[in-house]
Amino acid sequence: MSEKTESETQLHCPYCYNLQEDFESLKSHVLSEHKTEPVPEKEGLILLTVNGESHSVLVEPEWTLYYLLHDRMGLTGAKMFCDRGACGSCTVIMNGRAILSCLTLAIECDRAVIETVEGVAAEQPKLIEKYAEHHALQCGYCTPGFVVTAKALVDKNPNPTDQEIREALAGNLCRCGTYPQHPIAIQDFIRVREGKEDV
């Protein structure tokens, strides 16, 4: 029998996110440090990969993926604008598809591969540079959702038309009205990525 990997044995406390060596250690930690909180059950244990890193996390049934990523894991790039799935500012990529993290329960994300805007910035910094260069952002609050949606699009469709870009971004809202600049920034990013323009 092979040894368990670190991601399979170590668990994060759902209340303070401190790392514990195993489930029994986690229960002891909660009983001693969080006496007024419910003791976690193994049914709430999920394994997920976030921006290339493996995590084992005990989650509560009502936690959204947004809450887990933003409030528990400290990945604050995704934003909460409407909390109703109408604006796209909380978009992340799950298993290659752009999804709304405010409408996705964390408990449903077991074994999922998640990419947040922090991961996009590390993997494709030129995409964000092109957004800035072409003024596709103003206040910047909605920008992470747009960038993540754009990344999911070009991963699936390396050469989208302007119309396909507009359709992919249709679920993302911008109060500053930067909509015309998004296709320009994305098409410029594609040219750079394909080596058709000097980096």
Image: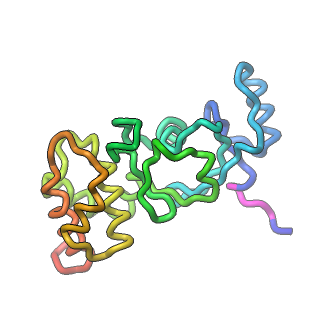
Residue nearer the viewer, 67 or 160 = 160
Residue 18 visible? The answer is: no
The image quadrant of residue 58 is top right
Q: Quadrant of residue 168?
A: bottom left
**Quick check: 75 left or right of 55?**
left
In the image, residue 190 above or below residue 115: below
Residue farthest to the right, as pictured: 1
User: Left or right: 173 with respect to 114?
Assistant: left
62, above or below 160, in the image: above
The segment highlighted magenta reads 3-7
Dominant secondary-structure state across the stretch colored magenta: loop
Which residue lies at the image location 13% right of the left edge and 52% below the top edge?
A: 135
Q: Where is residue 38 in the image (x, y as percent from the top left)?
A: 73, 27
In the rendered image, residue 124, in percent from the top left (x then y), is placed at 33, 64
Residue 57 placement: quadrant? top right
**Residue 161 locus on image (x, y percent):** 21, 72
Residue 130, position as x, y percentages in the image: 20, 60
Q: Does the magenta stretch include residue 183?
A: no
Please say if 81 is above or below 179: above
Image vertical order of residue 19 relative to residue 93, above or below: above
Q: Is residue 6 magenta?
A: yes
Q: Residue shown at 41%/36% (left/top)?
A: 83
The residue located at (47%, 40%) in the rendering is 70
Which image quadrant: the C terminus?
Answer: bottom left
Residue 9 shown left or right of residue 70 in the figure: right
Residue 178 appearing in the image: yes
- How many circles with numbers are drawn on the protein? 0
